[in-house]
Image (cartoon, grey):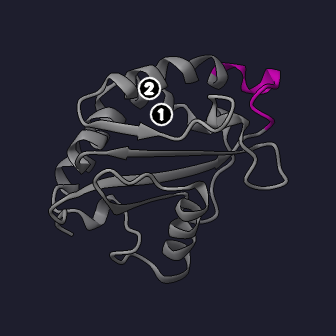
Amino acid sequence: MQQPSGTHLAQINIARGFAAVDSPEMKGFAERIDAVNAIAERSEGFVWRFTGETGQATDVRFTNDPRDLLNISVWETPKHLADFVFNTAHRKVYARKAEWFEAPKGPTFAMWWIKAGEIPTPGEALDRLEHLRAHGSSPEAFTWADLPEAKAILERRCA
């Protein structure tokens, strides 16, 4: 799927922790959040990330379960997002996800094109993820495997 002219890449990912993010069980994850977010914000191609009213996306409840977390961000291109995900400290935190998060039962990550200058709402982002779950990849919501540069991205992730 080629990036349309005049667009950026939006992404959502959700996860269910073994406990609430402010619990002792999640301390190892929680103490890394600010540093990883700071790296994202300094990364080339970073446009925006959802922070909620308190400045922390981890404080936003999108279900009744306080263990559920969401992350939404916008990047200039898939390469910029991939560089952050797979080539920064984020990669080390992601590699440890099984220590803090339940194994997902379906897709927990979706991407879509958004007009440059627009910012997705949590509702829109969750709708995109639900669309991916219900219908599979499409221009409405897709995964790394749907991008031309996916092979190189996935090879770097697995290296």
From the viewer's perspective, tell me whether residue 38 is left or right of residue 13.
left
Per the rendering, the mark at residue 120 is none
Residue placed under numbered mark 1 in the picture: 95
Residue placed under numbered mark 2 in the picture: 92
What residue is at 16 percent from the left and 62 percent from the top? 148
Structural crowding at the residue carrying mark 1, measured as other residues with C-alpha within 10 Å and reported as few (<14), some (14–19) or many (≥20): few
Q: Is residue 65 above or below residue 130?
A: above
What residue type is disc 1 on?
Ala
Structural crowding at the residue carrying mark 2, measured as other residues with C-alpha within 10 Å and reported as few (<14), some (14–19) or many (≥20): few
Q: Is residue 140 above or below residue 7?
A: below
Say which element carries label 2: helix
What residue is at 63 percent from the left and 38 percent from the top? 52
Dividing the picture into quadrants, the one containing residue 113 is: bottom left
Question: Residue 61: horizontal and vertical position, in percent?
Answer: 76, 47
Q: Is residue 156 magenta?
A: no
From the viewer's perspective, tell me whether residue 33 is left or right of residue 77.
right
Q: Are marks 1 and 2 in contact (CB under 8 Å)?
A: yes
What residue is at 80 percent from the left and 36 percent from the top? 19
Q: Give the residues in magenta.
A: 19-28
What residue is at 72 percent from the left and 35 percent from the top? 59
Question: Residue 156: horizontal and vertical position, in percent?
Answer: 23, 40
From the viewer's perspective, tell me whether residue 59 is left or right of residue 130.
right
- Quarter of the figure that contains the C terminus: top left
Q: Nearer the viewer, residue 11 or 158?
A: 11
From the viewer's perspective, tell me whether residue 131 is left or right of residue 44.
right
Q: How many marks?
A: 2
Q: Is residue 20 magenta?
A: yes
The CA distance from mark 1 to mark 2 is 5 Å
Question: Residue 141: horizontal and vertical position, in percent?
Answer: 41, 69
What residue type is disc 2 on?
Lys
